[in-house]
Amino acid sequence: MARPITREDLQEFISLHFDRSEENYVTAETAVDPSDIGTPMYASPLIRIGSTDDALWEEFKKPGAIGSFYRAPKDWLPEAKSVISVFGPWSDHVVESNAHEKTYPGSAWISSYAAGGALIKRLSVQLADWLTEQGYPSIAPAMSKDFRFVYEDGSQPDVPAGISYASNWSERHAAFVCGQGTFGLSRGIITERGMAGRFCSVVTSLELEPDERHYEGLYDYCIFCGKCAKNCPPQAIDMERGKDHPSCDAWLTEMKARNGVAGCCGKCQVNVPCSRKIPRAK
Ligand code: SF4
Ligand code: SF4
């Protein structure tokens, strides 16, 4: 019989393989600027749990949401009981490095986006594997061979028409259901520790007490101040329509060509009231 795994066990595992691991530091190999060597990429993570029985998962399949292309947790793992969402907030050093540069990404932001992105993805696989070894079959959907991302409408013959810039599993939608926070105008998730960071998630057969959602609407935590739109170098964010993915994507491609390391920007996540906390309307 599988031994019981508590939320504290999960937290310990995640922390050991993430913020407390030696991989959470910029190295001579990953640094874009030598002054960043030895600095942490992530601060301590926020972990939130959702139930696979939550009705919201099926809502994402509806037209106007992600669409029928989306796979709910039980479509990934029929015996699943819980979804674990992990938010890794960027460290102060990483956020400050990007906040100091108006147009181009800061050096620590670039190196952390590449190495830190790989670290949080690796964590999701390690967590799913560990839970499976403990007797609770689990999967990290975004790292599965069945994970799909569609850029252009009609570009993949087996994906229904009308779907673009969407994936069949979304870390941000999982975060919303699990209680991490709500969307902002820039389409990032505003958590208790703000928006500047990365997410991963694991779907597991381990039954855990779900977290409460302290919000109802998709955008409850956004105060629509428009700072993210003002900061966006290619003006990809509109106060009415939100983020235009192709414009953002073109800018990220340009940034990758410029820095040679990572297609990143993140100006909508720094120097904004939702960068490090839930903003409050004045
Ligand atoms: S900067 Fe303002 S408008 Fe943009 S996501 Fe944050 S709170 Fe919302
Ligand atoms: S990542 Fe950069 S280009 Fe994309 S929406 Fe945010 S500020 Fe704009």
Image (tube, rainbow, N blue to C red):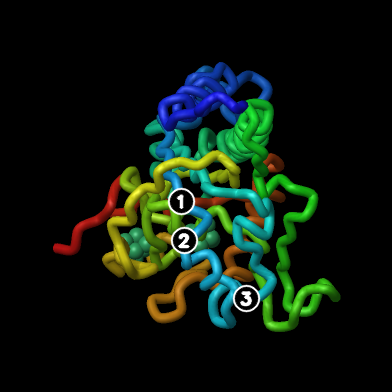
Quadrant assignment for the C terminus: bottom left
Q: Residue at x 57, y 22 (%)?
A: 34
Residue 50 — which label?
1
Name the amino acid type tagged 1. Gly
Identify the residue shown where x is 58% and y is 82%.
63
Numbered tag placed on residue 67 in the rendering: 3
The reply, left or right, for residue 184 in relation to residue 57 is: left
Three-letter code for the amino acid on which mark 2 is drawn:
Asp
Mark 2–mark 1 Cα distance, whole angstroms, equals 7 Å
Q: Quadrant of the N terminus?
A: top right
Image height of 177 relative to 219, above or below: above
Quarter assignment of residue 113: top right
Q: Mark 3: few, some, or many residues within 10 Å (few <14, many ≥20)?
A: some
From the viewer's perspective, is residue 39 above or below residue 51? Answer: above
Task: Inspect the image, locate mark 3, and give the three-letter code of the amino acid beneath it.
Answer: Gly
Could you tell me which secondary element the residue under label 1 belongs to? strand
Marks 1, 3: nearer the viewer: 1
Q: Which mark is residue 54?
A: 2
Q: Are marks 2 and 3 in contact (CB under 8 Å)?
A: no
Question: Between 200 and 79, which is closer to the camera in this rendering?
Answer: 79
Q: How far, Cα to Cα, is label 2 from label 3?
A: 17 Å
Crowding around mark 1 (Cα neighbors within 10 Å: few <14, some 14 to 19, many 20+) is many
Q: Residues within 10 Å of mark 2 (few under 14, many from 20)?
A: some
Q: Position of residue 154 (x, y in %)?
A: 79, 79
Mark 2 vs 1: CB contact within 8 A: yes
| Picture residue at 59% right of the left edge, 69% below the top | 245
